[in-house]
Amino acid sequence: MTPKPSLDSAASDGASELYVRYGDIPTGYAFDAAYSKPHPTKRC
């Protein structure tokens, strides 16, 4: 089974970053996967 994380916000501007790490808490420096497209409009 593959997890499919998603983000949702009522804000109309700004940016979100999504980091995923297997077996530990992800950070901006230690992660296994990250979203690669800047400023997605509706979906990650």
Image (cartoon, grey):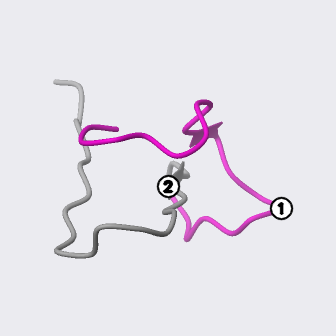
Q: CA distance from mark 1 to mark 2?
A: 12 Å
Relative to 43, does residue 20 appear above or below in the rendering?
Answer: below
Looking at the rendering, the stretch of residues picked out in magenta corresponds to 23-44
Q: Quadrant of the C terminus?
A: top left
Q: Which residue appears at 16% of the width and 24% of the height?
A: 1
Q: Label for residue 6?
A: none
Please say whether residue 40 is one of the residues in the magenta stretch: yes
Disc 1 marks a residue whose amino acid type is Tyr
Disc 2 marks a residue whose amino acid type is Leu
Q: Position of residue 23 (x, y in %)?
A: 50, 57
Q: Position of residue 40 (x, y in %)?
A: 42, 40
**Residue 13 lies in what quarter of the image?**
bottom left
**Residue 7 lies in what quarter of the image?**
bottom left
Q: Which residue appears at 52% of the width and 46% of the height?
A: 39
Q: Which residue appears at 74% of the width and 65% of the height?
A: 28
By secondary structure, the bulk of the magenta-drawn segment is best described as loop
Please say whether residue 11 is one of the residues in the magenta stretch: no
* Residue wearing tag 1: 29
Q: Label for residue 18?
A: 2
For numbered disc 2, what is the local secondary structure?
Answer: loop
Using residue 27 as the reference point, say whether residue 25 is left or right of it.
Answer: left
Q: Which residue appears at 49% of the width and 69% of the height?
A: 14
